[in-house]
Image (tube, rainbow, N blue to C red):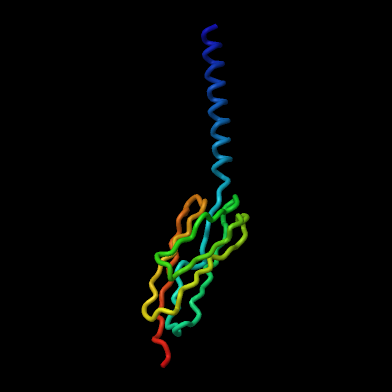
Amino acid sequence: MKKISLSAALVMALAFAGFAQQTGDAEEATYAEIYFEKTEHDFGPVDYRGNGTYEFQFSNTGSAPLTISNATSTCGCTVPSYPKAPIAPGEKGVIKVVYDTGRQGAIDKWITVTSNAKASPSVKLHIKGEVKAPAK
């Protein structure tokens, strides 16, 4: 009788372990992932008060909706904007970055994008270039 009870307990334990493993795999298979076509943009020489806008293209390569929770820059001269609605799997989106070109000199700014992406929840984007002196 002890052998039957022990065998039954062992079978049930293995069944529960197998069920838990299957459930865990199914949960892990559903996640968001963010992929940027490029993470750096070089404006090159830019006219004073010229166009300092760039759009970083990205896509959700995961299997769950991608939610971007924040996009911040290293200073107030660089203003990022991002989609507030979730990006469905396979869909694309844009992080728009506007740099204030009313400042002469080098552009070397970083933007941090935070999302629910599994492998890369924080991505750094970089803009660089040079704002020319104002025309006289």
Q: Which residue is drawn at 48% across and 82% down?
A: 50
Quarter of the image where one finds residue 133: bottom left
Q: Which residue lies furthest to the top in this view?
A: 1
Residue closest to the eye, 55 or 101: 101
In the picture shown, does residue 11 fall above or below 88?
above
In the picture shown, does residue 107 fall above or below 73?
below
Could you tell me residue 87's position as x and y percent?
Answer: 60, 57
Residue closest to the eye, 20 or 54: 54
Quarter of the image where one finds residue 127: bottom left
Query: In which quadrant of the rendered image does the C terminus lie?
Result: bottom left
Q: Residue at x 48, y 60 (%)?
A: 71
Residue closest to the eye, 86 or 11: 86
Could you tell me residue 135's position as x and y percent?
Answer: 42, 91
Q: Residue furthest left?
A: 105
In the picture shown, does residue 22 fall above or below 48?
above
Q: Which residue is drawn at 45% across and 56% down?
A: 122
Could you tell me residue 42's position as x and y percent?
Answer: 44, 76
